Amino acid sequence: MSTHEPPGRDSIAVDHLPPDLTRALYTHMRTARDLDTEAVALQRQGVFPAYVSVRGQEAAQVASAAALDPGRDFVFPTYREMASALAYGVEMVGYMATHRALWHGGLYDVMESRFGAINAVVGGPVPHAVGWAVGERMRGGEGVALAYFGDGASSEGDVHEAMNFAGVYGAPVVFFCQNNRWALSVPNERQVAGGSVAARAQGYGMAGVTVDGNDAAAVYDAVTEAAARARRGGGPTLIEALTYRVEPHSTSDDTGRYRDETEADRWRAHRDPVALLRAALIGAGHATDEELDAIDARARQRAEEIRDGVSAAPEPDGSELFTHVFRETTQELTRQRRIWEEEVQP
Amino acid sequence: MTELIDRTDAAAETPVLEELSMQQAINRALRVLLAEDPNVLVFGEDVGALGGVFRVTDGLQKEFGDQRVFDTPLAESAIMGMAVGLAMNGWRPVPELQFDGFAYPAIDQIVNQVARMNYRTRGAAPMPITLRLPSFGGIQAPEHHGESLEALFAHTPGLKVAAPSDPADAYGLLLQSVRSDDPVVYMEPKARYWDRRPVRLSEPTDPIGTSRIVRPGRHATLIAWGAMVHRCVQVAELAAEDGVELEVLDLRWLKPIDAAGLAASVARTKRAVVVHEAPLTAGLGAEVATLVTEQCFRDLAAPVQRVTGFDVPYPAGPLEPQYLPTIDRILFAVQRTLEY
C-alpha cells in the first residue's frame, strides 16, 4: 500500500473480532469524536488558547491503545493522542487540561495511567519508549512500550536513533506512526523519501507493517500482533497507519494556504472511521442501530462531562511555578520563590 | 525512589590514605553505586568491554554484568532519551556521553526532556539521571573534545551541575549526584583524570551545592572549578613566594552555586578573581561575579576580575595553552585587583 494514496475501500469488516470489543472501540471513537468537537468549540469560545484535532484519526488511536494492556504496558504519546488517552483509560479532564493550558504535560498522573506526559517535541518521546522497554526486559517484566509519532516526526533523527536502538536491543516496542498525510502544511511526498515509513523497518531489523488507519479492526489486529511479538521476545515492530488529517493542524492553522480541501472532503465522506465502524458493527450483527444510538447518547454525555470538567478546572496556583523544578529544591530557587511571594503573588 | 538502600558497605569503607587518580576514584564511586543500588545502570558508547575511552568504567561490566553496564549504539540523543525511559521504569541511569562536544546532539533530550520531566509530570516521573560528561580542555584533543558547557547546563532549569577538581571530590560528588533524585550533569575534567595523589575516599558530608576552600588565604579569592582549581593552586603557590596569600575556592557545584560560600570568602579577602576555561561572554564567571558583587558590594576593594578562555572556538593543540587561562594571566588579574 503506497503512503501517498488513500485506501480506497468504503467499508471495513469486524466480523472476526468479539462484539464486546468492537462495541467498546466504537464507544471510545464516538466519545473522542464528540469530545474533539467540544474542544474545537471551546477554542472558538476562548476557553482553550489552541487545540489540535484528532478528527479522522479515531480508529488509529483508539484501536491501537485498546490493543494494549494498561496494567503492564506503557504509552508514549505526542500532543495529538486524545482518542488514545481516552481508550487507554486516562483521566480525561486531566488530559484535556493541557489544551486549556493549565499544565503543559496534562494534569493526569502519567505513572498511574501508564500513559506518558503530553509531549510537544516531535519525535522526542520515541527514544523514551525504547528506554522504558529495555528497562522492562531487564527487570523481567512482560510490558510493551508503544510510541506514537506522525509522518512529520518520522523525519526526526530521534525516531531513527530510537528504531536502531530498539532493533539492536530487540526491545519490546511498538512504533506506531499515524501517517495523516500532512505534517502541518507539508504533504507526504515532500516529507517521506521513498514513500513509506513502514519500509524503514527493514533497515532497522524489525517487522514493518502498513495498515489502513481508518479501519479500527485492522489497526487493532496489527497492534495486537506487534504487542504479542514484543511480549514473547520477538522484538520491535513499526506500524504505519495510513489516515488523513481532515482538520487543520491546529486551530491556528489555515489549510487554504497549502491544500485543496476536496481531498479532505473525500476522506470525510467515504473514509470516516466512526461511520465505517458503525456500518461494520451493524453488518456483522454486533449491534443494532438502536443500540448504537444509545451508545452515541452516552458518548455525547461523557464528552460533555469532560468538557464541563475541564472548563471548570481551577487554574494552578502560582506557587506551582517552583514546586516541581527539583525533587530537592535549592536555596536560590527558594529565594526566587520568596520574591514571587512578596512581589508577584496576587 | 523510596526503596531502602543498604549503604553499610560503603559507609564502613575505611577512609585510608590511597594513591589514586581521579579516573580511578570515579571508577570506585561507580563500583560503590552499582553495588549499593540494584537500579543503577551504567551505559554509553564503549563503556563496556573497553571500559570507556578514558577507562573510567574499567572492569565494571565484568563485575556487574552486561545488563547493569552496557554499550549503546553511537547516538547521543538516543542515549539520553533512553535514560528518560529507563528512569520512568524505575531505574537510576548513569549514562556517559564520550566527550563534552558530543553532548550537543543530545541537547534536546537533556534540556527538553531530562530537565523538565519531573516538572512536566508534576513530580510523577522523577529523573534520577546522572550524565557523566568528560569535559573541558587541556589534553590537546581533536575539535569538539575540549568544550566547556557548564553555562548552558547551569542555565537550564531542572538540572544540577557538578564539576570536581580532585580524586576525593570526584568520588564524593559522584556518589551525591547519582543518589540524588534530580538530574545532574557531572562534568569530569579530562586534564585531571590521570592526576594521582594520596587521597581518602569517604562518604560525602557536605550537602549538594557546597563549595570548598582548597587553600586558605587573605589577600584575594581565586574562584574556579574543574581543572582550573589546580591551576589556581599553582598561582597561589607562586604568589605566596611574594608574600601574597591567595585563597582558592573550588566551587564544585555549578548549580546550585554556593552563594554563601562565595560571600564568606570574599567578605574576608575583599577581592575576587574568577577563572574558567569557557569563553568569557555569558560564561558562568559572569554569574559568579554578580553573586559576589550582590553580596559583598561594600566589602569589595576592587571589581571582580574574570580570567577565562577567549571568545573564540576552542583551538587546536598548539594554541590550546594560549587559549586556556595561563598562570601569568591569572597573576596579572590578581595584580590588577590588588592594585586597584
Image (cartoon, rainbow, N blue to C red):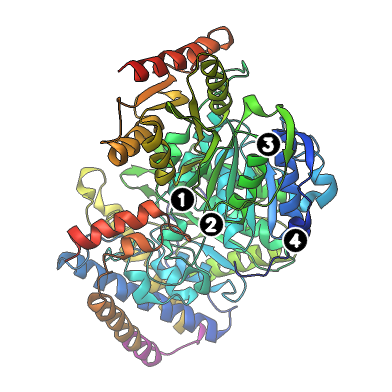
Residue for point 56% across, 51% down: B206
Of residue B33 and residue B63, the one placed in the foreground of this image is B33
Q: Which residue is mark 3?
A: B167
Of residue A221 and residue B322, the one placed in the foreground of this image is B322
> From this viewpoint, is residue A1 visible?
yes
Task: Name the image quarter holding residue A297.
Answer: bottom left
Distance from the alpha carbon under mark 1 to that under mark 2: 8 Å
Q: What percent of the width, then of the height, locates residue B58?
A: 79, 38
Residue for point 53% across, 64% down: A75
- N-term-proximal mark, 1 vs 3: 1
Which callout, 1 or 3, points to the residue nearer the camera? 3
Magenta stretch: helix, strand or loop mostly: helix
Q: Chain of mark 4?
A: A
Distance from the alpha carbon under mark 2 to that under mark 3: 26 Å
Task: Name the image quarter holding residue A80.
Answer: bottom left
Q: Which residue is mark 2?
A: B127
Q: What percent of the width, then of the height, locates residue B267?
A: 36, 37
What residue type is disc 1 on?
Answer: Ala
In the rendered structure, does residue A294 fall within the stretch colored magenta?
A: yes
Which callout, 4 or 2, points to the residue nearer the camera? 2
Distance from the alpha carbon under mark 4 to that under mark 2: 27 Å
Mark 4, secondary structure of its residue: loop
Question: Given contact means CB atoms under 8 Å apart, are the residues at marks 1 and 2 in contact?
Answer: yes
